[in-house]
Amino acid sequence: MSWLNDFADRIEHDAPIGHRTWFRLGGRARYLFKPRDADDLATLVQRARQEDVPVKVLGNGANVLICDDGFDGVVVRLDEGSFRQVEHRGTQVRVGAGVDLMGFARKCSTQGLSGLECMAGIPATIGGAVKMNAGGRFGDFGSTVTHVQVLRRDGVIEDWPQKRVRFGYRHTNLDDSIVLSATLALRQEDPTQVRRKFDETFAWKLRSQPMSENSAGCIFKNPAGLFRRGANGSGRTQGNALRPGQRFPPTRQFHRGRSGRHDP
Ligand SMILES: Cc1cc2nc3c(=O)[nH]c(=O)nc-3n(C[C@H](O)[C@H](O)[C@H](O)COP(=O)(O)OP(=O)(O)OC[C@H]3O[C@@H](n4cnc5c(N)ncnc54)[C@H](O)[C@@H]3O)c2cc1C
C-alpha cells in the first residue's frame, strides 16, 4: 500500500506546474496535492517526512521558476475554501494563506481598512506574501501582521506572534514551515482616502514596472548598495534561482521570460 493512498482523490501524479507560475515556464511535479484543510495537510506533511519526500507550497508562482526537469516531490496548492477564509474582528482580520493578496488588499481599502495599500500591484497569495515579506517603497507585509499560523514540518500547527517571525528584506525565518493564515491589525479610516491611496500606489507600480509582459517584476532583490545598478548578473532572486532572461526597461531589475511555454 502506498503512503499516498489516503489522499488519492486530491493528489495528481506527474502534474504540470510550470503553467501555474508567473512565467508559465518549467516542468512537472511528481505529485500535486490540494489538501482539504490544515489537518489533511499536516497528515501529508508528516508522511512525506517519514518517506523523505520534499514538500513545497506553490502560491501564485510570482516568485518561483520551475526547473525544466520538474520537481521530484509534493507541490501543495492551498486552493480549497478552508485556506481562503477571511474573518473580521473589528479591525483585526485573519486571512487564509490561499487568499489572493491583491484582491484582498483592494477589498480592504474599499472598506476603509487601511494598512495594505502598499501591497497594490504585488502578485501573491497571503502565504507567499508572509513567507517573502512582500513589499516595496511604501511598506511591507510584515508591518501589518500580529500572528502567523504555521504548520511545522513535523505536522504540528503553531500560532506565532509577530515578534517570533523575523520579517527582513524579502525574507523571514519561516524556513520550511507552511503558512496557514495570518492575522493583521488594520486601521479604520475614511474609505475614499484609503481607496485613493491604493489606486495611486497601483498606478505608480504600473508606471514603474512592466506588469503585463510576464516580466520578473521585483523577483530580483536589490543587491545591497546597488539599487537599480547592475542587478543583471549580480542580483539574487528572492526565491528560487532564475536563469537570466531578457532585460527589460525601464529599470535593469526587470527580466521577462522568452523561452517556450510549457502549458499542459
Ligand atoms: C510583476 C511582478 C511584480 C512584483 N513586485 C513585487 C514587489 O513590488 N514587491 C515584492 O516584495 N515582490 C514583488 N514580486 C515578487 C512576488 O510578487 C512576491 O515575492 C510574492 O510574495 C510571491 O508570492 P506568491 O504567492 O506568488 O509565492 P510563490 O512565488 O508561489 O512562492 C514564493 C516562495 O514562497 C513560498 N510559499 C508560498 N506560499 C507559501 C505558504 N503558504 N507557506 C510557506 N511558504 C510559501 C514558496 O514555496 C516559495 O518558496 C513581484 C513579482 C512579479 C512577477
Image (cartoon, grey):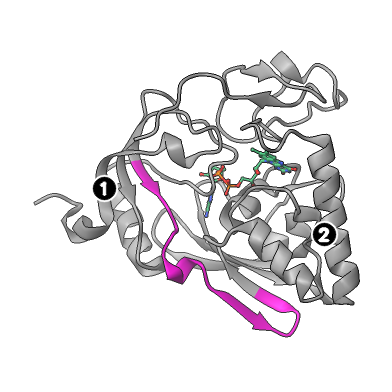
Q: Residue at x 86, y 68 (%)?
A: 194
Residue furthest out toward the front: 212
**In front of the other: 84 or 226:** 84
Q: Secondary structure at mark 1?
A: strand
Dividing the picture into quarters, in which one does residue 15 lie?
A: top left
- Left or right: residue 71 compared with residue 83: left
Q: Residue at x 82, y 25 (%)?
A: 250
Q: Is residue 92 above or below residue 115?
A: below
Residue 53 horizontal/vertical position (percent): 31, 41
Residue 59 horizontal/vertical position (percent): 52, 49
Residue furthest out toward the bottom: 90
Residue 164 horizontal/vertical position (percent): 67, 60
Residue under numbered circle 2? 198
User: How far apart are the two marked residues, 1 and 2, measured between alpha carbons?
Assistant: 38 Å
Dividing the picture into quarters, in which one does residue 70 lie?
A: top left
Q: Which residues are magenta?
A: 74-93
Residue under numbered circle 1? 12
Quadrant, the C terminus: top left
Q: Secondary structure at mark 2?
A: helix
Q: What residue type is disc 1 on?
A: Glu
Image disc number at residue 54: none
Who comes first in sequence, dot 1 or dot 2?
Answer: 1
Q: Is residue 78 magenta?
A: yes
- Left or right: residue 183 compared with residue 60: right
